[in-house]
Image: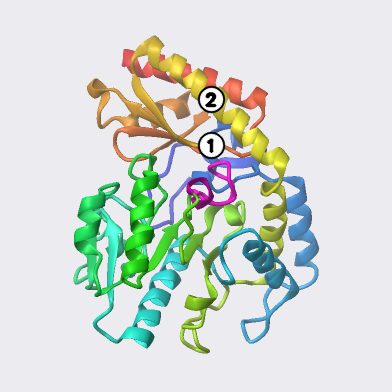
Amino acid sequence: MKNFITPNFVFADIIPEKAQGSRVWDENGNEYIDLAGGIAVNAVGHCHPELVAALKEQSEKLWHISNLYTTRPTQELAEKLVAHSFADKVFFANSGAEANEAALKLARKYAHDNFGEEKHEIVSCINSFHGRTLFTVSVAGQPKYSKDFAPLPTGIIHTPFNDIDALKKVINEKTCAFIVEPIQGESGVLPADTAFLQAARDLCNQFQAALIFDEVQVGMGRTGKLFAYQNYGIAPDILSSAKALGCGFPIGAMLCSEKYAQAFTPGSHGTTFGGNPLACAVGSKAFDLINNPATYANIERQNQLLRSELADLCGENQVFKQIRGMGLLLGCVLNEQYQGKAGDFVKCALQEKLMILQAGANVVRLAPSLLLNDEDRMEGVTRFKQTATKFQAA
């Protein structure tokens, strides 16, 4: 197939054509097990019939009406998010980057309105990832994503992840926000220490700065709770969500407390498509499918089984040395002799009809459907083992 897309993407050698649950078929009819989940997006699998029905129903009513109006699907999804989180208000966007952009702008505006222009610094973690807009790529602590787009926004400080002493040195009276992923996803599936997040909460309280949790990848059930912060018992002031929020239909959201919400005065921020009724109708049904006891029980069960099966694999062929993560976001850390080859492992897996991900150069990442069943998990693990054997022999 001739490619008409800009070359910033490197596409795999297959063309997916249809999918159902945790199975994908390419245009040649080959079947794949999907343990990547569209990069933690397809939280209830592909083409879930209830999501399809919700989309069809809304598509015959109202697609777009602009933010001069609100709609019932928009308010219904916002109400569910508020009722099951720390938040009082929701701003809808189209992606995780937009949700983080809104979160960062809100934090700066609140500080500007209440404390003046000097309180504008944003603290983020080294190796974090928060999106691809110029602002969010600057806040993220990975220069490889930002260095070619200088000059970059200023007033941004980076500090080591999980280092409390370093954090204490950079959060001060000039800080308007500290943004952190409860689990660093793109840099290796690294969970935050509870003590680190508690220190961040205490420092933000002390210096009247906003604590922002980026839950674009780890939210919406991925860790076994609706939001990852609920595993820690430490609530943020602002939270970003996307990916699984729409289970494949583009939508993002910024959740915040009433205290911060008031800084978004009329006209201070906006979006054309954010909160459109199509996206919110799908998101509302996805919310119901994710936020129920049966789904959380399946996440816990499949986590335990996957961990056990992958741990056995670590002992069998020594390709991996550690399995880490929470819920159904797992990172398989390559042994020293295979460092830097996570991408090669992912390519090898595709040859075995298995879809997985990498998270940095040294970690293979799994982010399957939260409704993953035993049959698909076992077949996926079988293909994962075949991949490991082939990879090791290469």
Amino acid, disc 2: Leu
**Which percent across, then down, holds residue 75?**
69, 72
Horizontal relation, residue 5 to residue 19: left or right = left
Q: Marks 2 and 1, Cα distance to the nearest angstrom?
A: 9 Å
CB under 8 Å between callouts 2 and 1?
yes
In front here: 180 or 153?
A: 180
Specify start and end residues of the magenta stretch as a single range.
218-232
Q: Which residue is mark 2?
A: 306
Q: Is 86 part of what is drawn in magenta?
A: no
What label sits on residue 109 in the rendered view? none
Residue 290 locus on image (x, y percent): 67, 47
Could you tell me the amino acid type at mark 1? Leu
Q: Which residue does the image show at 45% across and 72% down from the upper left?
A: 102
Is residue 211 visible to us here?
A: yes
- Residue at label 1? 328
Asked if residue 226 is among those painted magenta in the image, a careful observer would answer yes
Looking at the magenta stretch, what is its main secondary structure? loop
Q: Which quadrant of the structure image shows residue 378?
A: top right
Please indicate whether residue 144 sits to the left or right of residue 297 in the image.
left
Q: Quadrant of residue 376?
A: top right
Q: For the residue labelled by badge 1, is the local secondary structure a helix, a strand or a loop?
A: loop
Work out whether 391 lies above or below 257. above
